[in-house]
Amino acid sequence: MVHDLYQEIILDHSKRPRNCHTMANATGQADGYNPLCGDKLKLFIRIEGDIVKDASFVGSGCAISTASASLMTESLKGKTREEALKMLDKFHELLTTDTAVSQDLGKLVVFCGVRDYPARVKCATLAWHTLKSALTNNAAEPVSTE
Amino acid sequence: MSTLSSVVAPSFDVEKIREDFPVLKQKVHGKPLVYLDSAATAQKPFAVIDAIRRFHEVDCANIHRGVHELSQRSTAAYEETRAKAKHFLNARSKDELIFVRGTTEGINLVTSSWGRKNVKEGDEIIISAMEHHSNIVPWQMLCQEAGARLRVIPMNERGELLMEEYAKLLNPRTRMVAVTHVSNALGTINPVREIIEMAHKAGALALIDGAQAAPHIKVDLQALDADFYTFSGHKVIGPTGIGILYGKTKLLNAMPPYQGGGDMIKVVTFEKTTYADLPYKFEAGTPNIAGGIGLGAALDYTNALGIEKIAAYEHKLLEYGTEALLQIPGLKLIGTAKEKASVLSFVIEGIHPHDIGTVLDRQGIAVRTGHHCAQPVMDFFNVPATTRASLAFYNTFGEIDALVGGIKKVKEIFS
Ligand SMILES: Cc1ncc(COP(=O)(O)O)c(C=O)c1O
């Protein structure tokens, strides 16, 4: 049922997104856009040494994309650049394959229900695509899920 | 609510009509399908499905160039659709009706052929604030190429065009006014007769995008006096990949061909080609024969029901739906023009349309969410997207009740 998609944590983070603000001392930022639903996201990160010290976002989006951005920013803090990129791959795998749910994703496993809603995969991955762009620093062009 | 439907339209037996549409009988996610996305594409009756099948099974041949029996049959059936479309649109002559892929190609044919020849630097083209991208982008491309200026008739908060502003935009440099008859995002029925008359007085031509009008209201080309009018077969219960562009004979004759190839010629030598007469001059190559024949069956089906009866029934549905949706707290209709057809576009405070669409889908209710290929309309209403339920004559009052129930469920989940 539809509750497999909209699990409690997702609903909570969509209604009360964490880290939902701009960041004055960001070291990287990027814009993401999902033309399918008009979701727009601006992501900020602050990296010191190789560690993500802080991450935040602003934007407008559906419950899935908002919750995904919120949970992503939470889980990024303290990770190295490389660890963050690895999480991205794992997250993508979680949404698009039927393999066992990865243990390393922590709370992010709540998004596994998205698998059964192919039209919504892009909503869940928007924040992560944007993260990749912020980390790899080719943020001149907004990333698009299309 | 079947009692209500029989009171308002005693001669309109929607349950019997639904028997003709096989798609409607299925369950989706375990619930009876409630199809409210006919503005995107309409469902097809057996009459259309059978006509296409019959063509492939019995009459299949290329048209216009065979002396053999099958080619005669397929040519006759295909050309018969032109005659049916003439009747459907009340056009003067069937030679003014050109087969195209759909509305998009109809508009592109005009911008490419008429536009490149007639639009020059400093000229102006007028469109409106509620156009589908297919009636924006081709004009924009033409204007860029020619150095012409694109001007836009604004609208009010209800989604009605501001006619006084339109009057001010018209001037001696205006070459073309291209406006939609009915808005796909808002449902507004525009006063196109007046729009065309004003364009003509200013010495400009008028193209009307009939994609959302042809399925829902009577189109009378002779009364409208449009210079160009176009619609898509798939929105009038016909197949995809076929549509009609109407153009006045005088204009079409003066226009260069759109594409070159077979079927659009009289004589070809390596030095020179003489083009075919109307309408074939604009129909290069083997067309969508099956689609054309299917469209003929669709127009027959629509005519048998009667477009006026369809319009009356759909209007009752729309009124019923409007009232029902307005009872839902936090729901705001986008598009509340006095004259509307078929479309219930809405937003709900705090809930994204994409989430609404997913939850409704799991209840078997098919609606469209997004910008409906009308991003400037979304910008005007300052929303990223809307949820759109669009109605057809095979929808029932009960399905509107199901939509309302579905939205209540959405609100439960997200409140
Ligand atoms: C008002 C309007 N114009 C043009 C089009 C484009 O039609 P098609 O995609 O069939 O070419 C549509 C289809 O959604 C429409 O609603």
Image (cartoon, rainbow, N blue to C red):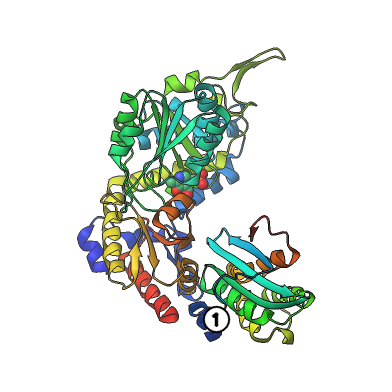
- As helix, strand or loop, the secondary structure at mark 1 comes to helix
Which chain is home to disc 1?
A: A
Residue B360 relative to residue B307: left or right: right
Return the x and y of residue B85 as percentages of the image width and height. 41, 36
Q: Is residue B256 above or below residue B77?
A: above
Is B151 rendered above or below residue B276? below
Using the image as rendered, state which of residue B344 and residue B33 is in the foreground.
B344
Residue at image position (72%, 15%) is: B270
Residue pictured at 26% horizontal, 60% vertical: B319
Task: Specify whether tag 1 is near ligand 1 (CB below 8 Å).
Answer: no
- Can you say which quadrant of the picture contains the N terminus of chain B? bottom left
The quadrant in which residue B58 appears is top right
Q: Is residue B172 left or right of residue B142?
A: left
Name the spot of residue A113 as percent of width and height, x first.
Answer: 60, 79
In the displayed orientation, state which residue is furthest to the front.
Answer: A25
| As drawn, B84 above or below B203 | below
Image spot of residue B344 (x, y percent)? 36, 59
Three-letter code, disc 1: Ile
Residue shown at 40% from the left, 74% from the top: B406
Residue B216 in view (yes/no): yes
User: Of B318 and B241, which appears nearest the observer?
Assistant: B318
- Which residue was labeled with disc 1? A10
Quadrant (top left/top right/bottom left/bottom right) for the C terminus of chain B: bottom left
Q: Is residue B285 left or right of residue B302?
A: right
Please tell me which residue lies in front, B157 or A80. Answer: A80
Q: Quadrant of residue A88?
A: bottom right
Identify the residue at horizontal 33%, vertical 25% (top origin). B202
Q: Position of residue B243 (x, y in %)?
A: 49, 40
